[in-house]
Amino acid sequence: MATLNFSDWQQRARDLVIERRAFIQGSYTEAAASGSFECHSPIDGRLLAHVASCDAVDADRAVSSARHTFDSGIWAKQAPAKRKAVLIRLAELLEQHKEELALLETLDMGKPINDALRIDIPAAARSLRWSAEAIDKVYDEVAPTPEDQLGLITREPVGVVAAIVPWNFPLLMACWKIGPALATGNSVILKPSEKSPLTAIRLASLALEAGIPAGVLNVVPGYGHSVGKALGLHPDVDTLVFTGSTRVAKQLMQYAGESNLKRVWLEAGGKSPNIVFADAPDLKKAAQAAAAAIAFNQGEVCTAGSRLLVEASIKDQFLPLVLEALSYWKPGNPLDPATTVGALVDQQQLHNILGYIESGRHEGAQLLVGGEAVMADTGGFYVQPTVFEGVNNQMRIAREEIFGPVLSVISFNTTEEAIAIANDTHYGLAAALWTSDLSKAHKTARALRAGSVWVNQYDGGDMTAPFGGYKQSGNGRDKSLHAFDKYTELKATWIQL
């Protein structure tokens, strides 16, 4: 198939038919109160759709549907190999519809179309396929018992799972959740962010087409304070999984305590350190990775390398390389395949990021590049990738998650100082380090309090590696076999023979 150009994507955007309704019990449906919210594209501010705005009544309908299908066993009691086949079919459908899904992602949250097409959609399909392929290869256990007894340790699906996912990687984060949840036999209610609900809504019909029974996967778009809160408090939701801000993560834990003590698994914020030692094997490669770590996806990444820790002896040599590498990352229309930095998700996000940039100036950090909103004439929301030097770890730009392309450069003199600065944060999602010294790499990686540590690269790993954080970055893990722990109960059955 020929590669689509800018005008091709613009035409497809004009021709695209967008589904805007909730999906409950196998059918698209209006919200019970017939309410809706306006879904605007951050590319140019245009109205994409009036999306169904679900509330507590809709949450109850979706939970009842999920509970009924779970209790019926129509999905939960299927052989793992049969669930595998259906989920693999769903992954294939994602790949078949990759251009439509990529376009929805780009129009909805502003990411560059090439990123959506080449990264997000394939990764979403891979995550579904991986969980599917794994499920009929996970064995239960037999305990070591006396001859006259039999001890069985079995995994069972937890039941009804509510998955609340973020707006920055809408389809991928949804598939990280629903893949293992469905593979293990649960019924799921998916609540996408109101800022980017469109691919989740489309995913629902693809799931039905793949063979997932009606009611096993339900999608309820709407606001966190309405349908999200209702799911958090619902007494018939067995497990709630979430990716998003630390503030909301804490609120969801409170809802679980106020209701049925449902299990809550959280992947929250980050303020990840990227440590470059003087003996880094390739400073140019490290600089290119540092630029990508803060500019990719407009910096709207929970693992963004937002704190660049540079050994003082190489700072004057290294920073020009970072600025040179950052020149590749320029804001542009996300429908243009040449664009590397797209639009921020909405005006509020632009306002927040500009506020942090002003805070950095006010607190005495030196602005090296960027710092301005651009392309305002488009009606969209764009900001230049921004670099501050002379930052200390007490400044707001070094302590708070900005969720935008704002890089804070902090210098250090010793390995111990670098580790202390890196760990001096409420978060613990990810970290990276660059060194040629194998011993230093191992010791530093062990000392860093983060769920993912990358050595001589940034953002490594695949579906075989667990993903999640320490401290206020959350609990539990997505990806890998460890993800199944979130969606299953362990049962010990002891039999006297």
Image (cartoon, grey):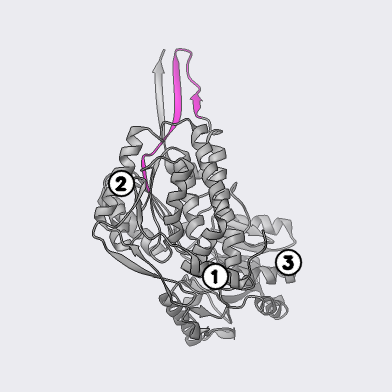
Q: Distance between the residues labelled 2 and 3?
A: 52 Å
Q: Are marks 1 and 2 in contact (CB under 8 Å)?
A: no
Three-letter amino acid code at the position of disc 3: Ala
Callout 2: SS: helix
Q: Of the residues tagged 1 and 3, which is closer to the observer? A: 1
Residue 425 at x, y percent in the picture: 49, 66
- Quadrant where the N terminus sits is bottom right
Q: Based on the displayed image, in which of its 4 quarters is residue 88 positioned?
A: top right
Q: Is residue 428 visible?
A: yes
Considering the whole magenta stretch, tell me its main secondary structure. strand
Query: Circle 3 sits on which residue?
Result: 280
Vertical order, 260 against 228 (above or below): above
Callout 1: SS: helix
Q: Of the residues tagged 1 and 2, which is closer to the observer? A: 1
Three-letter amino acid code at the position of disc 2: Val
Residue in front for this viewpoint, 429 or 9: 9
How many C-alpha atoms fall within 10 Å of the one at disc 1: few (<14), some, or many (≥20)? few
Query: Circle 1 sits on which residue?
Result: 11
Q: Residue at x 41, y 34 (%)?
A: 76
Region of the chain picked out in magenta, as a range: 140-162
Residue 201 at x, y percent in the picture: 41, 56
Residue 352 at x, y percent in the picture: 43, 77
- The total number of labels drawn is 3
Q: Based on the displayed image, in which of its 4 quarters is residue 252 positioned?
A: bottom left
Magenta stretch containing residue 151, yes or no? yes
Q: Residue at x 33, y 67 (%)?
A: 37
Q: Do the residues labelled 1 and 3 touch (CB within 8 Å)?
A: no
Three-letter amino acid code at the position of disc 1: Gln
Vertical order, 198 against 73 (above or below): below
Left or right position of 243 against 304: left
Q: Of the residues tagged 2 and 3, which is closer to the observer? A: 2
